[in-house]
Amino acid sequence: MFAWIQIISGLALLIYGADRFVAGAAQSARILGVSPLIIGLTIVGMATSAPEVLVGSVAAFEGKTSIAVGNAIGSNIANISLVLGGAVLFRPFLINSKTLMREYLIMIAVFALGLTVMLDYSLDKIDAIILLTGLAGFLSWTGYQARHPKRQDPFLKEVEEHLPGKEIKPGMSLFLLIVGLLILLVGAEILVRGAVTFAESLGISDLVIGLTIIAVGTSLPELAASIMSIIKDEADMAIGNIIGSNIFNMLAVLGIPVLIHPDSFGKEVLLRDFSIMTGLALLLGFIILAHRRFHRIYGVILMTSFIAYQTWLFTHSVN
């Protein structure tokens, strides 16, 4: 029971801290004269991945890098199956952005990079540097897109029009940035401790905890944001958030903890978890590139996949 209290409290602090941190980061960048589109495509994207990065980093400092590996892959699985599936079930939609199609192809390339560094069933500091170099390349590409925007692209227009933090007074932005980061750190520490205690009590591995409770918990803000985007008829924004989050998860959420504490992992990570993530990504690509329309049947398929995967993990992991 105490472990569950820690998990719920940690998640609550992560969600609240992330909201404050993202708003403070966006407004601080705005004050420094950064263009709105660059803020929306890069700074907000990095800030929204802060909960996953900090959870993974705290776990790595405690020698639990498997939690970070599970969180990175599990969050990507949850983003596509739970977040996108839930949004499509709520309301089917059509996407029109060509930028999203290019971002999807980049996401696939990032997944391929992640697979390449994980083929030896270990992650060392060289692998971390490769992943973080990939992150720098992605940020450079998005920065280029922001400097050379195509005004007719609905995704780029939605990003620029719906930046967070506009309501914050300039004098409060730095305060919220620091306070949000501190809350994130506390929430990450509490969540990791609770998750490890819960895992040990049931005989579940750190990897599975990262793939399930932590991955789903840190994906809940994306679910809420995606549904709100659908309600506002901003489907391109919803898909863009999911694709961007997946890219950051594979490069930063995996790369930073590994830089702190390199580790090895079992074959099931690639044979089971990475394969499921890739299969869901290919289904997403089929819809984006071939149809562009997300019907409810796709939502059913995605949600069923999520439930089946989570059920299989728990039923085959609890001792």
Image (spheres, helix red, strand yellow):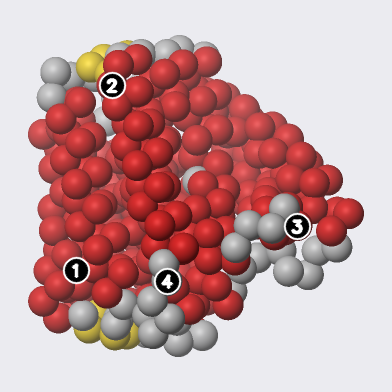
In primary-sequence order, the first of circles 3 and 1 is 3
The one of 112 and 63 positioned closer to us in this rendering: 112
Q: Position of residue 167 (x, y in %)?
A: 78, 70
- Image location (x, y in percent) of residue 112: 16, 40
Q: Report crowding for label 1: few under 14, some 14 to 19, many 20 or more residues within 10 A (C-alpha).
A: some
Along the horizontal axis of the image, is 288 left or right of 10? left
Q: Viewer-proximal residue, 89 or 33?
A: 33
The residue at the far right in this view is: 171
Q: Which residue is mark 3?
A: 31
Res 127 label: 2
Image depth: mark 4 or mark 1 in front: 4
Q: Nearer the viewer, residue 123 or 149?
A: 149
Q: What separation in Å lies between label 2 and label 4 (alpha carbons)?
A: 33 Å
- Disc 4: which residue: 149
In the image, is residue 188 above or below residue 225? above
Give the label on residue 301, or none: 1
Which of labels 2 and 3 is toward the front? Answer: 3
Mark in the foreground, 3 or 1: 3
The residue closer to the viewer here, 141 or 290, is 141
Q: Residue at x 34, y 15 (%)?
A: 125
Residue contact at pointers 1 and 2, CB within 8 angstroms = no
Q: As shown in the figure, which amino acid type bears the numbered disc 4?
A: Pro
- In the displayed structure image, the side of residue 94 where residue 178 appears, left or right: right
**First along the sequence among labels 1 and 2:** 2
How far is mark 3 from mark 1, CA to CA? 44 Å
Assign a secondary structure to mark 4: loop
Label 2 residue SS: helix
Q: CA distance from mark 2 to mark 3?
A: 36 Å
Query: Between tags 2 and 4, which lies in front?
Result: 4
Query: On residue 216, which mark appears?
Result: none
Q: Is residue 9 above or below residue 228?
A: above
**Sequence-wise, which precedes: disc 2 or disc 3?**
3
